[in-house]
Image (cartoon, rainbow, N blue to C red):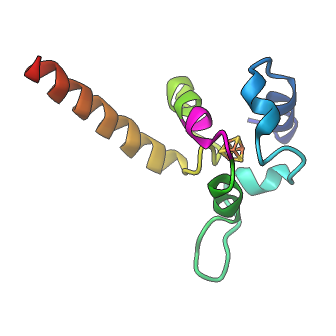
Amino acid sequence: MSRIGLRIRHLSNSDPWRRHARCLGKPYELFEQPFPVDEDGRPLAQAICEACPVAAKCLDQAIDEGDDTTYRGGMTPDERRAESRARKHNRELEGARS
Ligand code: SF4
């Protein structure tokens, strides 16, 4: 994804919840790989996402879209893949119980 693409995606998407995204106006480099990190190795974007009121919706959408490049929803692509597998596993368990 290009840098311009990330900014346009957040600003032009018609989903109303995106207007509340904490990342609006933030440098897009924070959300692109290699993710800049603090002295403890945490992605700088993490603090932005942790304070974001629409993080859950953002995470759901990033997983649904299979975004494997950017930091979104408070997670790296690897973390989202793990989250997606955990959700799938939970759905299968729930299906087996019903
Ligand atoms: S969770 Fe992070 S990437 Fe998603 S909208 Fe909020 S600040 Fe932006």
The residue range painted magenta reads: 53-59
> Overall secondary structure of the magenta stretch?
helix
Say whether residue 42 is left or right of residue 28.
left
Instruction: Farthest residue to the front: give it.
Output: 53
Q: Is residue 57 above or below residue 55?
A: above
Residue in the image at 68% along x and 56% along y: 51
Residue 84 image-quadrant placement: top left
Which image quarter is the C terminus in? top left
For ligand 1, which image quadrant applies?
top right
Residue 65 location (% of width, % of height): 56, 24
Residue 34 image-quadrant placement: bottom right
Residue in the image at 59% along x and 32% along y: 57
Q: Does the magenta stretch include residue 64?
A: no
Residue in the image at 76% along x and 31% along y: 18
Closer-to-camera residue (5/21): 21
Q: Is residue 55 magenta?
A: yes
Which image quarter is the N terminus in? top right
Closer-to-camera residue (12/56): 56
